[in-house]
Structures are given as C-alpha cells and as structure tokens.
Amino acid sequence: MVNTIIFDFGNVLINLDFDRCFSAFRRLLNVQWGLREAPSTINEAIIQYDKGLITDSEFVASFQTINPAVAFQDVKDAWNSLIADVPGSRFNFLKELGDKYRLILLSNINAFHVNRVHEILEVDHGILNFESAYFDRVFYSHLIGKRKPEPDIYEYVQTELKLEGDKILFIDDLAENIEAARVCGWHGQIHDPADDIELKLKQYLEALENAQMHD
C-alpha cells in the first residue's frame, strides 16, 4: 500500500514558463537558439549547476562565453524567468494530502531557482518555511549532488526514507524520470503540466488504491 508521495517541483507543484526563459536568453545573448538547442557547454553547465558542482559565478560564466558583455545579474534574471508562479490552492492541497501520506519533494533544481521560488512564496503567499511546513523530507539535486534520471538519486532517496519501492508514488512531468523510478520499483505517474495536479493526483490515487485492494 502506498504511504508516501514524492513530488517533482517544476511543472507539477509550481508553474514554469520555458518560452519566457528561452526568449530572455535569445535577447540577452543575441542568438536564435533556445536553451534546448544551446551549445554543449551550456547544457553541461546546467547539469553541473543542478548538481551543485559549480558556483553561481561559474554558471553565469558559461553564458558569458557566448556573449562576454552580459552582466551577472542579467543572466540570473533571465534564468529565473523560468519560474512563473505557485498557485495558491497548492497549500491546502498539500496539507490535506499530508494528513494521509508522507510527502516528499524531489527536484532537479539549483541555488538561483530555489531562491527565486522562496521569493515568490514570501511575496505572493506570505510563506517563509515552505519545505518544512508541507513536506516530511526535501531532496534538492544541488544539495545532494545527484540528478534525475540518474539511477543513484532514486536509490539514495529510497535509502534515506527507509522505504520499499512499492510504498512510493512518484509524480513527475518527464517520462524519463518516471521510467527510471519504476526501475527501482516505485509507482509512477507522468504529469502533464496542462492538467490540474490536484484533480489528476486524486484520480490516480483512487485508481491505485482500488487496484491494490483487489491484489
């Protein structure tokens, strides 16, 4: 029986705006590509930054190799433009879930984005202690040096939680992250960011619980 729900953060609990972010970098760097078509040096820097292996300044410097004239703050602002908003209904949703399930946050994230999310939570919702108020444990990639869908991040989380995989339901918007979790024996649901996580998750939990009752 599932007793633990592990949430991805971006495009599951918080909204992201990739188009805005890509447009900001195209203007800033005077290029035509988006981050998905960026040079390998940029993509590698993103992975390293998400794993906490390079500093803020080293991350920014990877963009300055494309356009040396850009300022640190401009790169930071463009990068942070990915974070759109945190819907206010999420908080009651998490509180209600927390009465029945152990809630965990597992995110590929970095220092700039964590700080930006905290700013939004404080300014828009008056929340200062989001992680400790709504989750039993939080695993941020830049703090643990591991990143989805690398197998060792799932093994690390499961060991830390001292749980069997079939006790876990993992929600993520990327298929590769869900597939890697399923290899570890977790239950998984791919979430379409266009859908309402609050409605979709409840439907999935009901279906999962009914299936387990008849096993």
Image (cartoon, grey):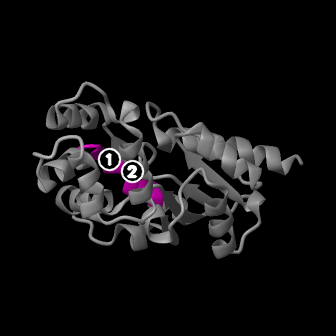
Instruction: Quickly name the residue at label 1.
Output: 87
Residue stretch in magenta: 81-94
Please state if 51 lies on the left or on the right of 116 as rendered: right
- Residue 173 to residue 134: above or below: above
- Residue 119 to residue 64: above or below: below
For label 1, the SS is loop
Q: Which residue lies furthest to the right in this view?
A: 215
Which residue is rendered at x = 52% and y = 71% of the image?
137
Which residue is rendered at x = 30% and y = 27% of the image?
33
Residue 146 screen position, x and y as percent? 54, 63
Q: Distance between the residues labelled 2 and 1?
A: 26 Å
Say if residue 187 shows up in the picture: no
Kind of residue at badge 2: Ile
Please state if 2 lies on the left or on the right of 198 as rendered: right
Instruction: Quickly name the residue at label 2.
Output: 46
For label 2, the SS is helix
Which residue is rendered at x = 29% and y = 43% of the image?
82
- Residue 16 to residue 98: above or below: above
